Image: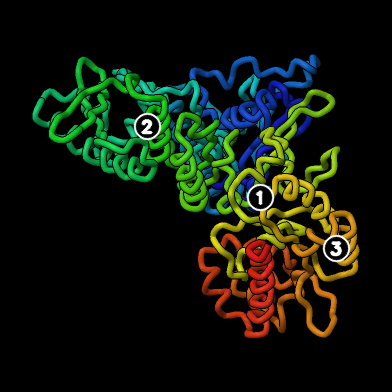
Amino acid sequence: MKYVKFEIENYRGISEKLTIDLGTTSLIPLIGINECGKTTILQAIYCFDYINDASYQKKHLENTLNLYKTSDADLPTVTATIEFKSEELRDIIEDNNAREEAKAEEAEEEEKTYTPLLIDIDIMKNIYTNKVKIQRNIKTLKYRFIDKEFDGLQNIIKKIVSHSPYILYNDDFMDRPPNSIDIPNTKPPVLTDWSAIFERLFKLNKYSLFDLNKETDERRIRSVISDVEENLNEKLSKAWRTFLLSNHGSLSVKLALKNSKLEINIVEKIGNKERFFDVADRSKGFLWFFNFVMKLEFNPKIAGNIKDTIFLLDEPGSYLHSTAQKKLCVKIKNISEKNGNVIYCTHSHHLLNPEIIRINQIYIVEKNKNKSITAIPLAKMNLQREKINAYQPILDALQIPIFDDFHSNSKIILVEGIYDRYTISIFCELDSDISIIPGTSAESIVKNLQFVIGFSKKYIAIWDNDEEGDKRYKMACKLFGEHEAMFFSKLPSNNEKTRKMEQMFENDDLKKICNTLNLPNNSSYEKIILDLYYNKNKKKIVENISDATKKNFSSLSTMIKKGFEKYEDE
């Protein structure tokens, strides 16, 4: 089972259908100003799985009605599109039929009447080949199939949901790990979210926390807890080294079972000395770290492929310093590639590093003129004011002035668009102190020039060597004068040919790169360059391009180098 899409309607401030599509990406950042609705989107998705109903203090299930609509028909709903293999549906139906027949036999033995609800596997397989849409009414907490109506199939639907990936929600501000966990004596035990997490931890060590609570042999209890602590601390230590939350000492967790409670202490070791703290005594940065790692490593719902888990991260790393946030950005990317799908909201530009996060994966969250929360992929944004920078929708959403781009000590290359930036970064040899600022057109370079000149930056501007590029190049020369024109260039061309950036590639090099990346043969230049930019083996791929293409980009590298050398001659 795998979630590929969520559609939300009438949940709190979401009046109009809002779609989060995981069909083509496993990583979606949600960005926007405060109170724009980012958390609402995460909590709506969290509502879909009934397994989560008792967690997060049920806050995601409170006050869910949309106050902009008052009709009884406008109830809050979350619809999930779930992909599955035919054998997965067959197993669920066969399990249901076996249970229904067992109930009928038990009723017959007790001389009671029970009509088993048996499902015809062939009918279901014909209707649902490999995908199903299930809607949950968040007011009534009932499910239904969207595409076809079936009466009395609530059990089947819940089985499908229970076999679907875990949906984890991590809130930096309210979701705090406890100092101790009550161990229930009921059969079966009633689990809270944290007792379920620790039960999962114990189960990975082939024990049950609830069985251990009934154990009378203290030696066995200590032995089991020792094994569990070793596993837990190994995971925590590895993550601690990754994030480097402090520069001294080391941390570990100590567990104790007392009076049907699992007590949790944090042990800090400095030199040979140990100091013991309650979880709540630690910093907010550590609380985030502990909460995040425990839910990542020991999520209680093991269903389907663990790599399809949905991670909903609300302002991850808010209490971490900038260096740790940069490392977290890499970690989030890795989680989306190895552990599941990540949907996260953030105000931090450290978690939107374009070297790591694809710009076309970002959703901009805002409220439209009808006060309804919307989430629009960055590529589909239609800003009211003209864009002069490819990152401008992100800057607008984070409320970061465009001038911040020019406050660094870097030398700057102005180019027409984001794919020019990607291509130059990949194929040209650049000094480490050079930043490339992408515009949105040939004209946008002209507008960006006023900022680099105004901030006295060392820069060069590069247009495509085509009709539009030539027009804007000449316009810039006229507007800014002969001195500034020394730093204006067009792409190098041979034999007076016009040339755009994609025409820097000779022979079949783009086609070869496309094949190496296993992309469809009809993939666009933009798609090929974007995938290459984020490919871990791009250096090897670049080495295999033709000498003619290498020569073209060598000419461009030389042009860039000579452009910046002009500042030394002044």
Nearer to me, 422 or 119: 422
Q: Position of residue 430 (x, y in %)?
A: 59, 66
Q: How many marks?
A: 3
- Amino acid on which disc 3 is placed: Tyr
- Amino acid on which disc 1 is placed: Ile
Q: Does the rendering let one see residue 448?
A: yes
Which residue matches tag 1? Answer: 359
Q: Position of residue 374 (x, y in %)?
A: 75, 33
> Which class describes the residues within 10 Å of circle 2: few (<14), some (14-19), or many (20+)?
some
The answer for how far apart the CA atoms under marks 1 and 2 are is 29 Å
Report the mark closest to the observer, 1 or 3: 3
- Numbered label attached to residue 473: 3
Looking at the image, which residue is at 64% across and 38% down?
80
**Toward which corner of the image does residue 480 lie, by quadrant?**
bottom right
Report the mark closest to the observer, 1 or 2: 1
Q: Are marks 3 and 2 in contact (CB under 8 Å)?
A: no
- Numbered label attached to residue 290: 2
